[in-house]
Image (spheres, rainbow, N blue to C red):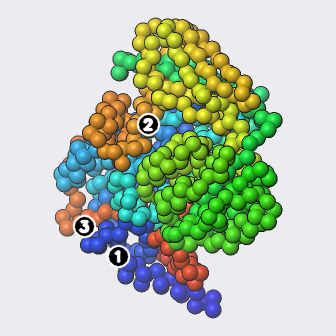
């Protein structure tokens, strides 16, 4: 039996690889993600995975992270390659630079309108010039195209971005997303859908592209503790407020989940106050105000709540994510008070409802809900929009305040249409989206929280479920600050302030305000609101040239990114020229990657390939995120025998490539 499995594992991939067409080569292309089966490779064939290594260097000073991501491409085959790689980014990243390096030559990219950048890139390829094009598909999904990579070429592309870190409950978190999960599409995707049809590696096949991450932290205050819940890291301290950390290994298996580093400052302090920047490039003055919220106060009496739990049971949630979601929901539903009411809606391609009207949180009804949840199995598509419409239309118990709890990994490609639906139909309630898994779609989770006037939560695994349930209960029972207002007074001449309005603050995270100012910084900023128990808050922040250093160049990028995020949430639904033009102008003025501006770098040297050399475009396949099953690809369920066959196929192909590739190198 063992020999039969080995033979099947080795030869079946070759048959499937020969018979499985690439969607890009089909006349009737698919918009769904798909598995790609790595060819065992013939002598002289092109290397199917030109991306060899990704090197990440992050430097955090105070609350601002500067990150460099270098992608190393190498053509080990005999064809001229174009490599296309879809990869994730932080939802808060302001991408402001790109370099292309070929041997000793280094070319700085320029920012241009998206269509013009694409045209310049395509023209460079026809002229036999190596070029790189970086495009934004979503605020957290980017596409890198590197064209005209000759056989034997080594090409490096380095992108740079800036990000503001915001603590929650005085715990700081740096996240470097590593993989784009497979997206479910139903024909209503926002904008460009081609990236959603990205290839993925078969289960069990680690990506040959290796990963290294190095991080340096200069916190400005003593660091009490630091750890990574996602990866094995080594941490070295260079003083009470400085540390260095790096992955213990650089193998491809590091790239199947987001990298997360968490750290807490001694005494549970947070960096707050006013930062200023006088920018010579734009001639503008920028500021960042960070205000620590008051301590949470629990009211003596908490009125009854009406909860609707909306739970994703689609194929991508099968196994580890759904098990985590069930544990979370057991903690939440099991912790309801007798004065509460609730309902549960499960959804995949369709949805099912526990009851037509809210149920009292009695023991029998809670047990019924838990049995309803336990009976669910992950399969099918992710019709999130229809599920949210049904949940939003449910009746609210008279005299109760509605809270919707959405539990999902967020693997859909129509985020903005769901944002719009929530804004239009939520009423006076709040929506708290909980992202479940190792590489959730944070654009969806964070965007829904903004649209639903709630807070986003990310739960990496089952161990974090109890704490997340308790945190959510506290948020809903007692917001930290309501009726928030910021008054800059007459002395501090501010304009272009972002955000324009301030929602209630549920999480224990600082209030951050970006903006510009004219003239000399002076006067006083007042922040007012209502804390728990009805206590009025009136905070005064003095403004002087000495209240914050004026040399903070990252502020202009962060301000522009914040403003773009406000404008771009609704653009796909209301594509008016005014909004598009403002986002485009912000991108061009500040040199930022946006939905409408791209980076393009073109080598000036013309390099001809040997006569008769074929050309090929290779779409770099991504690993499945850790814990996500094969059923996530294609949007449907994969039966257990088929899952086993996919795993066997992938392992056989991987073993074939490793064994014969090694033999070739040795010979």
- Local crowd at mark 2 within 10 Å, few (<14), some, or many (≥20)? some
Total count of labels: 3
Asked if disc 2 and disc 1 are in contact, CB closer than 8 Å, the reply is: no
Specify the label residue 631 is tagged with.
none
Q: Which residue is mark 3?
A: 614
User: Quarter of the image containing the C terminus?
Assistant: bottom left
Q: Position of residue 166 (x, y in %)?
A: 60, 34
Specify the label residue 566 is tagged with.
2
Residue at image coords 50%, 39% = 92
Q: Is residue 152 left or right of residue 257?
A: left
User: Whole-Å distance between the Cαs marked 3 and 1?
Assistant: 19 Å
Sequence order check, earlier mark of 2 and 3: 2
Residue at image coords 41%, 61% = 196
Q: Position of residue 120 (x, y in %)?
A: 22, 46
Helix or strand or loop: what does disc 1 sit on? loop
Asked whether the viewer can see residue 217, the reply is no
Asked if disc 3 and disc 1 are in contact, CB closer than 8 Å, the reply is: no
Asked whether the viewer can see residue 470, the reply is yes
- Local crowd at mark 3 within 10 Å, few (<14), some, or many (≥20)? few
Q: Which residue is mark 1?
A: 21
Q: Position of residue 93 (x, y in %)?
A: 48, 39
Quarter of the view holding residue 225? top right
653 to 161, vertically: above or below: below
Q: Is residue 396 left or right of residue 330?
A: left
- Residue depth check, mark 3 versus mark 1: number of the one nearer the observer: 1
User: Quarter of the image containing the N terminus?
Assistant: bottom right
Sequence order check, earlier mark of 3 and 1: 1
User: Whole-Å distance between the Cαs marked 2 and 3?
Assistant: 46 Å
């Amino acid at each position: 039996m063992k020999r039969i499995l080995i033979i099947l594992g080795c030869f079946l991939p070759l048959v499937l690889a020969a018979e499985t067409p690439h969607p890009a080569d089909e006349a009737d292309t698919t918009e769904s993600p798909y598995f790609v089966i790595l060819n065992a490779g013939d002598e002289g064939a092109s290397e199917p995975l030109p991306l060899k290594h990704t090197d990440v260097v992050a430097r955090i000073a105070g609350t601002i992270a500067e990150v460099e991501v270098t992608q190393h491409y190498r053509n080990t085959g005999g064809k001229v390659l174009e490599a296309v790689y879809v990869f994730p980014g932080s939802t808060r990243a302001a991408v402001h630079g790109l370099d292309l390096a070929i041997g000793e030559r280094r070319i700085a990219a320029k920012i241009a309108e998206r269509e013009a950048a694409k045209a310049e890139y395509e023209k460079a390829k026809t002229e036999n010039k190596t070029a790189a094009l970086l495009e934004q598909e979503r605020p957290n999904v980017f596409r890198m195209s590197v064209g005209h990579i000759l056989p034997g070429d080594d090409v490096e592309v380095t992108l740079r971005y800036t990000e503001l870190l915001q603590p929650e409950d005085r715990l700081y978190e740096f996240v470097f997303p590593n993989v784009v999960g497979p997206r479910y599409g139903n024909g209503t995707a926002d904008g460009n859908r081609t990236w959603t049809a990205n290839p993925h590696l078969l289960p069990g096949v680690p990506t040959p592209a290796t990963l290294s991450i190095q991080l340096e932290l200069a916190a400005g205050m003593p660091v009490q503790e630091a750890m990574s819940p996602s990866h094995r890291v080594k941490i070295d301290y260079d003083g009470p407020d400085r540390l260095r950390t790096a992955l213990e290994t650089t193998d491809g298996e590091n790239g199947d989940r987001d990298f997360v580093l968490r750290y807490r400052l001694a005494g549970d302090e947070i960096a707050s106050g006013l930062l200023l920047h006088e920018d010579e490039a734009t001639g503008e003055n920028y500021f960042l105000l960070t205000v620590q919220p008051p301590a949470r106060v629990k009211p003596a009496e908490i009125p009854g709540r009406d909860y609707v739990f909306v739970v994703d049971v689609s194929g991508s949630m099968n196994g580890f994510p759904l098990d985590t979601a069930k544990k979370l929901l057991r903690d939440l539903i099991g912790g309801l008070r007798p004065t509460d009411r609730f309902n549960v809606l499960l959804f995949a391609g369709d949805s099912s409802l526990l009851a037509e009207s809210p149920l009292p949180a009695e023991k029998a009804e809670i047990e019924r809900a838990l049995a309803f949840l336990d009976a669910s199995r992950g399969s099918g598509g992710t019709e999130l929009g229809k599920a949210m419409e049904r949940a939003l239309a449910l009746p609210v118990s008279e005299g109760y305040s509605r809270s919707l709890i959405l539990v999902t990994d967020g693997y859909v490609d129509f985020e903005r249409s769901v944002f719009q639906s929530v804004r239009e139909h939520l009423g006076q309630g709040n929506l708290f989206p909980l992202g479940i898994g190792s590489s959730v779609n944070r654009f969806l989770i964070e965007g829904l929280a903004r649209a639903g006037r709630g807070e986003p939560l990310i739960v990496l695994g089952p161990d974090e479920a109890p704490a997340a349930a308790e945190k959510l209960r506290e948020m809903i029972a007692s917001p930290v600050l309501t009726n928030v207002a910021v008054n800059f007074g007459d002395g501090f001449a501010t304009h272009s302030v972002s955000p324009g309005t301030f929602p209630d603050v549920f999480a224990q995270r600082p209030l951050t305000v970006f903006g510009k100012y004219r003239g000399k910084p002076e006067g006083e900023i007042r922040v007012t609101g209502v804390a728990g128990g009805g206590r009025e808050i009136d905070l005064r922040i003095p403004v002087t040239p000495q209240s914050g250093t004026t040399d903070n160049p990252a502020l202009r990028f962060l301000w522009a990114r914040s403003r773009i995020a406000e404008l771009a949430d609704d653009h796909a639904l209301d594509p008016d020229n005014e909004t598009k033009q403002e986002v485009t102008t912000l991108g061009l003025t500040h040199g930022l990657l946006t939905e409408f501006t791209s980076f393009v770098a073109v080598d000036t040297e013309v390099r001809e390939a040997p006569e008769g050399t074929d050309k090929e475009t290779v779409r770099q396949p991504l690993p499945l995120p850790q814990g996500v099953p094969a059923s996530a690809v294609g949007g449907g369920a994969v039966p257990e025998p088929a899952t086993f066959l996919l795993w066997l196929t992938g392992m056989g192909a991987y073993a074939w490539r490793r064994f014969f590739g090694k033999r070739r190198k040795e010979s």
